[in-house]
Image: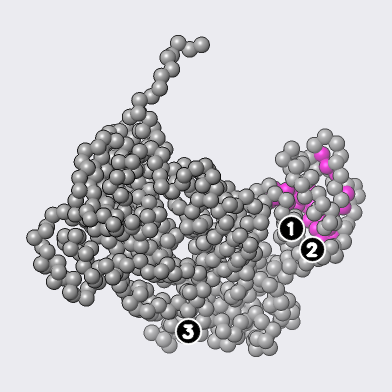
Amino acid sequence: MSNHKIEVLDSNTIDKIAAGEVVERPASVVKELLENAIDAGATAVTIEIKDGGINFIRVTDNGEGIDKSQVPTAFLRHATSKIKSIEDLFTIKSLGFRGEALSSIAAVGQVELITKTKSALTGVRYVIEGTRERIFEDIGAPEGTTFVIRNLFFNTPARRKFLRTPTTEGSYITELIEKMALSHPNTAIKYINSGKTKLQTSGNGQVKDIIYQIYGRDVTESLLLAKCKEEHMMLDGFIGTPELARSNRNFELYFVNGRYIKSDLITRALEEAYKPYMMQHKYPFVVLYFRIDPDLIDVNVHPNKLEIKFLESEKIYHFILKCIHEGLHRQEMIPTDVKSDKAKRETPVCYDKCSPEPFEKIRIEQENSVKNELREPTGYVTETVDMRDVMNSPILKKVLMAPEEPSVSPEDYSHNIIKANEQVIIEKASQLELFDQPFLSKEAAHEHRILGQIFDTYWLVSFSDKLFIIDQHAAHEKVLYEKLVNRLREKECISQALSPPLIVSVSRHEEELIQMYLNQFTEIGFEIEHFGGNEYSIRAIPADLYGMNEKELFREILDSLSEDMPKGEPDAVLHKLASMACKGAVKGNHAMSQEEAAALIEELLALDNPYHCPHGRPTIIAFTKYEIEKKFKRIV
């Protein structure tokens, strides 16, 4: 046995180790304090940082405050008002619940707290540094809570030196606050970085306003509504059109019961739903809100509460697939070169709701000037005023009065015209206006005018005031894919016997996949038998795949099933087969007759999703008359 003596660590060391699990960087502090403010019922929160939050963080809210008798207790480890027992973890609805946030922050920072409850006559000022209480006194203060954190990791220099530059640390905080603003649109959030206001939301519940502020006009105009509801779960929010595809998953934003999370299950479902619309290695833009019965999820699986577990994962997976599929099918999605001139709009930003400003103990002599300023209809309060007067003024009380929390249902956003005094004016996106007469509809087919073929690859078709260009290979590929999918699904496929049979050597993982999907392979025309050892014999294949290097094709199917399909997905083999079989589509640089092109277009418009080939490339693009006339300088 080792000669090292086993000893119990002292409380100071224990606190710093625990703090290391919760407080990784300044963004961790902002996250915990912002979540606490929202859990405290705040309708408005102001966050201010300097030096990337390393030397200064201030979070002010108009929530319910902390009772004086409970202030010291709030800084003890595992002290929380949000749960009482282990059973509460399985029905948790608050953002924070571990009771480690304040104790961890106090262990590695200089913390000042100013708080007042509604019923208290005075507020409380509490200063604690590295778990040591410095000041505990009564003070005049507005209702709510202000936290000031200075010199993060002042007592753990080894950790402080591993922080990034102030600019980088500030960017982490900015990203966090943007996600928090999206997850709680009913809370007015003001974010100040080094004296400059970076984000200010009105708290009016309009998610699209916040998306506009963060991501701009182009993204906002390319969003589609998504809304579904089933027993124990609901999804609503916005999904981006395929033209918003990104090269990473950073824009896949989804929130479960008000909490931003990351989930392999949700990510797989989203990307599978988008797969027919996007090219490989492209990812969608989504902002989605899930409401799921707390009994069906476990949020206590990650130190930062970023991951959760689902009780009925397969049910949730198919629910997401269905909802995204329906959202993408509601609108014709033919990419256009530019928006029309209607897209040129002024979008003034107005605020009629103030975030709470930081409490200031000094400058009491400015009392008279503050009262005069409050009579001006500016709607703003500066930081140089005495907040005791400001917070007690009838004007600001009215401004900060918590309204009945509106629903975050995206149905409220359908008309997208918001009064100027609410916040942002955003008219309907021009993409929604372009296709009042859908190009790919039976009613419009007789108005199509085929102009000819260019480069032996693309067909030009005029319709209404637009010019459409159709990629004959992508279109034919899509038509073949849908035909084969339908034949396979309806079990109308014909098997083609192989003589001699194909002998395929597989790995243990591939063997598991064959056994898992054997029924699906058999139903669509394969005959597969175990040949001994790690080898399998393929005696027959679907006739549509005959002559296409069957062994290589079979391995491609196994590879695809291994990579990106949830285990046991019934249609997995079917879609992979159809995607492989569409390799027989007519290629580019092939001259087609006008009759053949007309027949192809007719078959294309009959499909549910004619806009993209099975690999996600667009089959059709469009140029508006406006853009063409602009190119010829008819419009300046």
Vertical arrangement, residue 354 with respect to residue 16, above or below: below
Q: Is residue 137 magenta?
A: no
Q: Looking at numbered disc 3 in the image, what kind of residue is underneath it?
A: Tyr
Bounds of the magenta segment? 535-561
Residue 325 occupies quadrant: bottom right
What distance separates the C-alpha of mark 3 from that of mark 2?
A: 44 Å
Question: What residue is shown with label 1?
Answer: 571
Q: Nearer the viewer, mark 3 or mark 1?
A: 1
Q: Which residue sits furthest left?
A: 365
What distance separates the C-alpha of mark 3 from that of mark 1?
A: 43 Å
Q: Is residue 553 magenta?
A: yes
The picture places residue 572, in percent across and down from the top left corner, at 72, 55
Give the SS element for disc 2: helix
Question: What residue is shown with label 3?
Answer: 626
Do residues under tags 2 and 1 come within 8 Å of each other at their CB atoms? yes
Question: What residue is shown with label 2?
Answer: 489
Vertical arrangement, residue 568 with respect to residue 488, above or below: above
- Residues 88 and 571: in front is 88
Residue that appears at 30% across and 66% down: 400
Report whether 607 appears left or right of 251. Answer: right
Q: Can the viewer see residue 304 in this picture?
A: no
The picture places residue 231, in percent across and down from the top left corner, at 63, 62
The picture places residue 274, in percent across and down from the top left corner, at 60, 62
- Residues 259 and 444: in front is 259
What distance separates the C-alpha of mark 2 from that of mark 1?
A: 8 Å
Q: Looking at numbered disc 2 in the image, what kind of residue is underneath it?
A: Arg
Report whether 469 appears left or right of 73. Answer: right
Question: Looking at the rendering, in which quadrant would you find the C terminus?
Answer: bottom left
Label 3 or label 2, whichever comes before in sequence order: 2
Q: Can the viewer see residue 459 in this picture?
A: yes
- Neighbor class of circle 3 (other Cα within 10 Å; few <14, some 14-19, many 20+) is some
The picture places residue 158, in percent across and down from the top left corner, at 32, 32
